[in-house]
Amino acid sequence: MAFHWPVRVYYSDTDAGGVVYHANYLNFFEHARSEMLRERGFEQDELAQAGVLFVVRNMNIDYVRPARFNQALTVVTQVTKLAGASMVFSQSLDDAEGRCYCRAQVTVVCIDSEAFKPRPIPSHIKQELARVS
């Protein structure tokens, strides 16, 4: 089941043309992934203390239509692939009518917080993430 995270476009999210600055879509997507983990009981600072970090390895992004100041939108996040040390998220920023403004495929790798080397995703985290697929 997909995770839904509501966002509001603030003035600080926009560029001189009044539309969301392209890099700020990445923030919306990052916040939604963090909140998805939090909803499932995983605080990223606590994970880091336990030796687990999640880092973005790759992202393919498609800017579909411009989002504008004060729009209420939703980031929809789904886990589309879970592997040993990596996972792929499918994310989109949609309005209430289901129109997509931006979508991305994000590959995230689990790394050891000390060595900064890939490590397997802990099984209890993997089980929870499988519920968002």
Image (tube, rainbow, N blue to C red):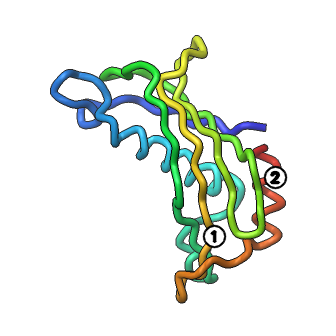
Query: Is 83 left or right of 106, judged from the image as shown?
Result: right
Query: Is 71 left or right of 77, judged from the image as shown?
Result: left
Q: CA distance from mark 2 to mark 1?
A: 15 Å
Q: Which residue is mark 1?
A: 110
Which residue appears at 52% of the width and 59% of the height?
56
Q: Amino acid at mark 2?
A: Ala
Near mark 1 (Cα within 10 A), the count class, few <14, some 14-19 or many ≥20, is many
Percent x, y for residue 45?
A: 53, 72
Query: Is 34 left or right of 66, judged from the image as shown?
Result: right
Q: Amino acid at mark 1?
A: Cys
23 or 124: nearer the eye?
Answer: 23
Percent x, y for residue 85?
A: 70, 69
Q: Which residue is mark 2?
A: 130
Query: Is 69 left or right of 90, judged from the image as shown?
Result: left
> Which residue is farthest left?
16
* Quadrant (top left, top right, bottom left, bottom right) of the N terminus: top right
Which residue appears at 63% of the width and 77% of the height?
118
> Which residue is farthest bottom?
115
Quadrant position of residue 133? top right
Which residue appears at 55% of the width and 45% of the height?
32
The secondary element bearing badge 2 is classed as helix
Q: Choose the circle earlier in sequence order: 2 or 1.
A: 1
The secondary element bearing badge 1 is classed as strand
71 or 123: nearer the eye?
Answer: 123
Mark nearest the camera among 2 and 1 is: 1
